Image (cartoon, rainbow, N blue to C red):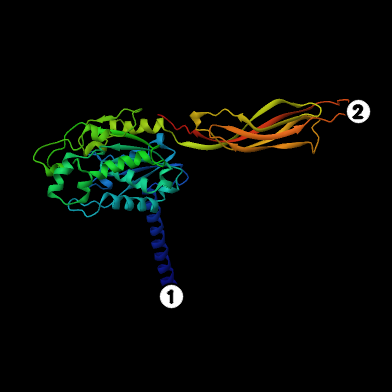
């Protein structure tokens, strides 16, 4: 009897452990870390008064799940970020929420990925920019941000709402002329090397929000929450802003993968593929170096270039130099070549020197000859091709 009760208790304990492990595995899967070897992560950041459910359409389609199961994003994990933004009378500023967002992404191991991209709605785009400015090391991993209805120049609705609701976020998002927060944010973004190279692609709403929905509750009539110019200010001009035929809330609720909001992000993602870092060796040989009898061939700054492919973001990390194919180049009669510096555009500066043979009984016994081989170590980023259908 004792053994039977012991075995039953042991089985219950094992079952509890199994369920806990299963729950932990599910939690990691929900934030996209189960496939931790994927080089890129796509992070969804909701807007003001939003939540993880901000991305769910009326037919139940959930944008993060549509991406997670789409083979065209097979090199990317998916994370759905969340931060506290109560429906009214919130107490936290954008700066505070940006730091909360960064800490939560750190807990989700987002910054362990080689590349990070963001899909941001409304306030989410502002918080992402503020966060990256405060964490330049992590900003270096961000390839691009795709923002939907982000009020880069503020919103008239937020200004009016701030009269009734003292949430500091509404002041941050106001289109009032004295809103220094947004103007300083944009100025800082453009001035800092850690952020001004991050691509920003934008989509904007083309329909008004009804009074009973979200921001609209502050008004008596339907209105455009974020106008075209505010939603597209500061965004990349190489990819035109995308019009989404939806209001401010439904702009991020695609019904399926053919929806314009989904397709816009897919095209941006395709045009900015995951990059795989590689190191290649490439050399340049300078021939015809010679020194006749009792003469010297010396150069303290011989500039040797190497061709670089800008499309692969190639850059030289190191270079070495050596004499090759030597003739009558005797030990002790030369200064071996040394690379003194390497320019960013791929030019190595070489210092070297050697002398020709000495005459014997007034007779020249030959000419010292050599070639100079400069080997460049080049780091480059090679696009990784994912399925397109």
Left or right: residue 97 versus residue 162 is right
Q: Position of residue 209 (x, y in %)?
A: 16, 37
Dot 2 or dot 1: first in sequence order is 1
- The outermost residue toward the front is 362
Mark-to-mark CA distance, 2 and 1: 111 Å
Label 2 close to label 1 by CB (< 8 Å): no
Indicate the quadrant containing the N terminus: top left, top right, bottom left or bottom right.
bottom left
Q: Residue furthest left?
A: 220
Q: Nearer the viewer, residue 97 or 369?
A: 369
Q: Is residue 259 visible?
A: no
Identify the residue at the far bottom of this view: 2
Give the image quarter of residue 193.
top left
Count the labels in the image.
Answer: 2
As helix, strand or loop, the secondary structure at mark 2 comes to: loop
Number of the label disc, if any, that sits on residue 2: 1
**Secondary structure type for disc 1:** helix
Q: Is residue 369 above or below residue 252?
A: above
Residue 280 seen in this snapshot: yes
In front: label 2 or label 1: 2
Return the residue at label 2: 361
How packed is label 1: few (under 14 Cα within 10 Å), some, or many (20 or more)? few
For residue 285, side relative to residue 133 (left or right): right
Where is residue 351 shown, x and y percent of the image? 67, 35
Pick the front one: 224 or 38: 224
Quick one: quadrant of the C terminus? Answer: top left
Q: Residue at x 79, y 26 (%)?
A: 292
């Amino acid at each position: 009897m004792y053994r039977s009760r012991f075995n039953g208790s042991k089985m219950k304990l094992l079952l509890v452990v199994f369920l806990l492990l299963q729950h932990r595995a599910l939690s990691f899967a929900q934030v996209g870390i189960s496939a931790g070897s994927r080089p890129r992560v796509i992070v969804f950041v909701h807007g003001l008064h939003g939540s993880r459910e901000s991305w769910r359409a009326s037919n139940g389609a959930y944008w993060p799940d549509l991406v997670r199961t789409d083979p065209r994003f097979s090199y990317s994990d998916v994370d759905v970020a969340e931060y506290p933004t109560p429906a009214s009378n919130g107490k936290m500023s954008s700066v505070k929420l940006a730091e909360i967002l960064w800490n939560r992404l750190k807990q989700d191991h987002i910054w362990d990925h080689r590349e990070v991209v963001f899909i941001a709605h409304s306030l989410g785009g502002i918080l992402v920019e503020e966060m990256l400015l405060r964490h330049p090391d992590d900003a270096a991993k961000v390839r691009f941000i795709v923002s939907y209805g982000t009020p880069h120049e503020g919103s008239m609705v937020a200004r009016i709402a701030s009269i009734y609701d003292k949430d500091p976020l509404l002041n941050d998002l106001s289109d009032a002329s004295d809103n220094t927060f947004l103007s300083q944010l944009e100025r800082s973004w453009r001035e800092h090397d850690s952020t001004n190279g991050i691509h920003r692609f934008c989509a904007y709403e083309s329909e008004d929000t009804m009074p009973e929905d979200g921001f609209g509750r502050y008004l008596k009539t339907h209105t455009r929450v974020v106008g075209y110019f505010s939603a597209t200010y500061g965004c990349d001009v190489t990819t035109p802003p995308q019009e989404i035929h939806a209001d401010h809330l439904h702009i991020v609720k695609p019904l399926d993968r053919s929806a314009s909001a989904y397709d816009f992000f897919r095209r941006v993602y395709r045009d900015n593929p995951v990059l795989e870092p590689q190191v290649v060796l490439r050399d340049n040989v300078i021939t015809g170096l010679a020194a006749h009898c009792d003469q010297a061939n010396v150069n303290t700054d011989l500039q040797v270039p190497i061709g670089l492919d800008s499309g692969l973001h190639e850059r030289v990390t190191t270079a070495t130099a050596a004499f090759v194919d030597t003739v009558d180049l005797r030990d002790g009669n030369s200064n071996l070549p040394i690379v003194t510096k390497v320019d960013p555009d791929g030019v190595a500066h070489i210092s070297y020197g050697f002398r020709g043979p000495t005459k014997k009984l007034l007779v020249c016994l030959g000419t010292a000859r050599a070639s100079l081989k400069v080997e460049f170590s080049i780091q480059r980023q090679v696009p990784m091709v994912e399925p397109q259908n």
